Each structure stands twice: as structure tokens, then as C-alpha cells.
Image (spheres, rainbow, N blue to C red):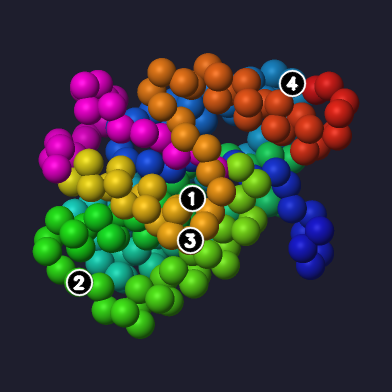
Amino acid sequence: MIGDVEKPVVIGVLGTHSTGKSTFLARLAHDLRRRHIQVTTVADLGEQAQRAGLPILHNHTWASTLWFATRGISYELEAWRHGDVVLVDRPVPDALGYYRAALEYRGEQPEPTTLAYLESLVRGHSVHYDLLLRTTLDASIPLGNNKDRDEDSEFRVLADRFVGRVLDELDLTHELLPANGHDQALSRAIEFVATSLSGDAAV
């Protein structure tokens, strides 16, 4: 219980683009709902940011990163009221990882005070994630074609590296989600939810 809101089980999946995050979360949501668990989802905010005219991917700025983080936090808190489990596509550490990847890509250094503020925000909110899964990049797997994709392979590698680095540097416990490990991770996540919601009782 946090204030007057009973916090649900919150699971986030983050990592570089086109590594199966949304597909995995859709499968997880489907399997949990089949078990009669009330699931709420928080979608990737990339398309919303584009419609708002915000710079994304290798053009990320501190302002767009702050927008992703604060908008994501707002949506997550709204979702807390509507599900036993909240599934988050790109939890807030992802935005910080992308910002740092963008700076590296452009050969720029972050302003220390700004970076410290973003890190504090991400670290402070991330205590509310019960399970974080980070996808790992397999460059041999082609980009998905279900929506417009950034095809810059150099930035994609940097995003993979810096999302992982943010998790490590902020000491955020997480598990890896390789491309060939989705079935195993799905079973692990379902078991985690079952245990979290009802102790040792089966779901």
C-alpha cells in the first residue's frame, strides 16, 4: 500500500528497439488474463512523442528524456488503480539509457546537474518495479516490419549497451531476456506473478 493506492505487481520490459519487447508483453498479458488476472498495460510512448514533435532515438535531448520519464510515470500510476498486474513497455530507465546512447552517438557530454536529476528521478521511481526484464540485442535478427523502424544499426547497438549500463550503474535488479529465451521468461514471469499475488497458491 502506497498512500491510498494498493500497488499492483509491476513488470517492465526494456531494451533497444525491435528486440521483441511488445511481442513478449502481449503474450504475457494474454496468458495472465487466461488465468483470470486483471492486467493493465502501459504502452511504448515513442509514437506519442513523435506526434508531439519531440526528438527521439539518436536525437534524444534532456527535455525529451524528461518527457518520456514523467509521462511514463504518470501513466504507470494511473494504471495502478486498474489492475492486479501492470505491464510496462519501456519503464523509465529505458529513457535514460536512450538519452545516454544519443549523447554517445553525437559525441556530446551530458551536463552533470541535468544528468544527476534524471538519474535521481529514474532511481527513485524504479523501486516500484517488481520485475524488470532487459532484452538483449541479436544483430543477426532483422528489424521487425510491423511499423516504421529506425535502421541505424550503430545507434541500435549503443541503445542496447547504455540501457544495460543504466540498470547496472543505478543498481537496478533485472533479468536478461534474450531473443531465444522468451518461453522461459514467460514461465518465469507467470510464476513470479502467481507467487506475488497469492504466496504459494497456484494461479
Query: Residue at the spot x=73%, y=47% of the render?
Result: 8
Q: CA distance from mark 3 to mark 4?
A: 34 Å
* Extent of the magenta region: 132-154
Secondary element at tag 3 = loop
Asked whether 148 or 193 is in front, the reply is 193
Q: Which mark is residue 148?
A: none
Q: Name the spot of residue 188 as percent of width and height, x first.
A: 63, 26
Type of residue at label 1?
A: Pro
Could you say which disc has been placed on residue 109 in the image? 2
Is residue 2 in view from this perspective? yes
Quadrant (top left, top right, bottom left, bottom right) of the N terminus: bottom right
Please identify, in this view, whether the residue under mark 2 or under mark 4 is nearer the observer.
2
Query: Callout 2: helix, strand or loop?
Result: loop
Q: Which mark is residue 170?
A: 3
Within 10 Å of disc 2 (Cα), the crowding (few <14, some 14-19, many 20+) is few
Q: How many marks?
A: 4
Alpha-carbon span between mark 2 and mark 1: 24 Å
Say which label, 3 or 4, has the lower sequence index.
4
Identity, as a three-letter code, of the amino acid under mark 4: Arg
Left or right: 148 as drawn, with respect to 17? left
Of callouts 1 and 3, which one flags the residue occurring earlier in the amino acid sequence?
1
SS for callout 4: loop
Label 3 is placed on what type of residue? Leu
* Residue 5, magenta (yes or no): no
* Residue that carries the numbered disc 4 in the rendered image: 35
- The residue identified by callout 1 is 91
Tell me the element at label 1: loop
Where's residue 81, x and y in %? Answer: 72, 51
Q: Predominant secondary structure in magenta?
A: loop
- Residue at point 61% right, 42% down? 131
